[in-house]
Amino acid sequence: MRSIAITLALVASACAYSVSQPSSSMGWSTSGGQPLTWSRVDTDPTNFTVVLTNQDRSVLHQDQVLIAEQDGVGQTKVSCNPPSGGWPVGNHFRVNLVKNVDEQNTILAQSSEFTIKAANTTSS
């Protein structure tokens, strides 16, 4: 009986919002808007809030809401604009898709850890 419950829990978690980008192999840069892509199933909420987070508070002092209300049904890709102070640079960032601005602890999906790198600049 216990193995059935574990299997059902794994199946349920596999059938929900899933963030494919950013990822550990494809992070972001500090150059303008950055891509967020996801997949969903019909039972997922139709909207979510996008939050940038990092457990290292010396890199990101507090979580940043990037998009307050995103339609999750009509599209599966959006460009996230930088927070008001610009993109932070560093490792161990995650993007959380949460229920809404007021319920940020209700995480619907979470990206893998990724890096935000400074954009390449060249001078002539």
Image (cartoon, rainbow, N blue to C red):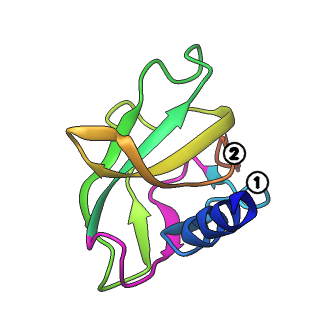
Q: Identify the residue position indicated by label 2 in the image.
A: 113
Q: Closer to the N terminus: mark 2 or mark 1?
A: 1
Q: Residue reaching furthest top?
A: 58
Residue toward you, 20 or 1: 1
Sort mark 1 into few (<14), some (14-19) or many (20+) by Cα contacts within 10 Å: some
Q: Is residue 124 above or below residue 3?
A: above
* Marker disc for residue 8: none
Q: Quadrant of the N terminus?
A: bottom right
Measure the alpha-carbon separation of dots 2 and 1.
Answer: 6 Å
| Magenta region | 29-46
Q: Is residue 86 above or below residue 50?
A: above
- Identify the residue shown where x is 31% and y is 82%: 73
Residue 107 visible in rendering = yes
Q: Does residue 2 appear to the left or right of 41 in the view shown? A: right
Residue toward you, 109 or 15: 15
Q: Secondary structure at mark 1?
A: loop
Q: Quadrant of residue 88?
A: top right
Residue 87 located within the stretch drawn in magenta: no
Residue 36 located within the stretch drawn in magenta: yes
- Identify the residue shown where x is 62% and y is 50%: 29
